[in-house]
Amino acid sequence: MRKYLFGIMILILGLSAFSFGGKAPASIAGHIKFYGNAPFEYPGIETVDGYLYAVQTEKDSGISIEEIKATQGKMIELTGRVEKKEKLSVFSLRDGTFVVSDFRILE
């Protein structure tokens, strides 16, 4: 009986250790497009899979939104994370917001 309890405790502790790990960064590829009307336009990305994400930059990434805007018309790959919201806000798109930590031009 003690062996089973000890085994179950080890299993629970092992599983809980993995549950606190951070999410791996996601990578998406697509084209930057602008949404909204001037002066309230904002960048978004339409991925090759057909998803639409608003684009924001990570605060400590060293990348400005202006750098990403300059890639309009080129195929780019963004690395970061997806933030999905329950309700759409003014500066959001259908599939959420992609927070960029790094990017590169593919074309």
Image (spheres, rainbow, N blue to C red):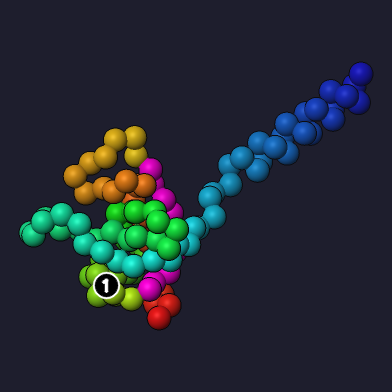
Q: Is residue 27 magenta?
A: no
The residue that mark 1 highlights is: 72
Query: Would residue 43 be found to the left or right of residue 6 on screen?
Result: left
Range of residues picked out in magenta:
75-84
Magenta span main SS: strand
Query: Would residue 15 be found to the left or right of residue 63 on screen?
Result: right
In this rendered view, identify the residue nearer to me: 106 or 98: 106
Residue furthest to the top in view is 1
Looking at the figure, which quarter contains the C terminus?
bottom left
Q: Is residue 83 magenta?
A: yes
One can see residue 102 in this view: no
* Image coords of residue 86 (percent x, y): 34, 35
One can see residue 32 in this view: yes
Q: Is residue 82 above or below residue 65?
A: above
* Image coords of residue 60 (percent x, y): 35, 62
Residue at image x 90%, y 21%?
A: 2
* Image coords of residue 69 (percent x, y): 24, 70
Residue at image x 88%, y 24%?
A: 4
Residue at image x 43%, y 77%?
A: 106
Query: Would residue 83 be found to the left or right of residue 40 on screen?
Result: right
Q: Based on the displayed image, in which of its 4 quarters is residue 66 positioned?
A: bottom left
Say which amino acid is labelled 1. Gln
In this rendered view, identify the residue nearer to me: 89 or 49: 49
* Image coords of residue 29 (percent x, y): 43, 66
**Mark 1: which secondary structure?**
loop
Residue furthest to the left in view is 39
Q: Is residue 69 above or below residue 5?
A: below
Looking at the figure, which quarter contains the N terminus?
top right
Q: Is residue 43 above or below residue 84?
A: below
Q: Based on the displayed image, in which of its 4 quarters is residue 10 positioned?
A: top right
Q: Residues within 10 Å of mark 1 (few under 14, many from 20)?
A: some
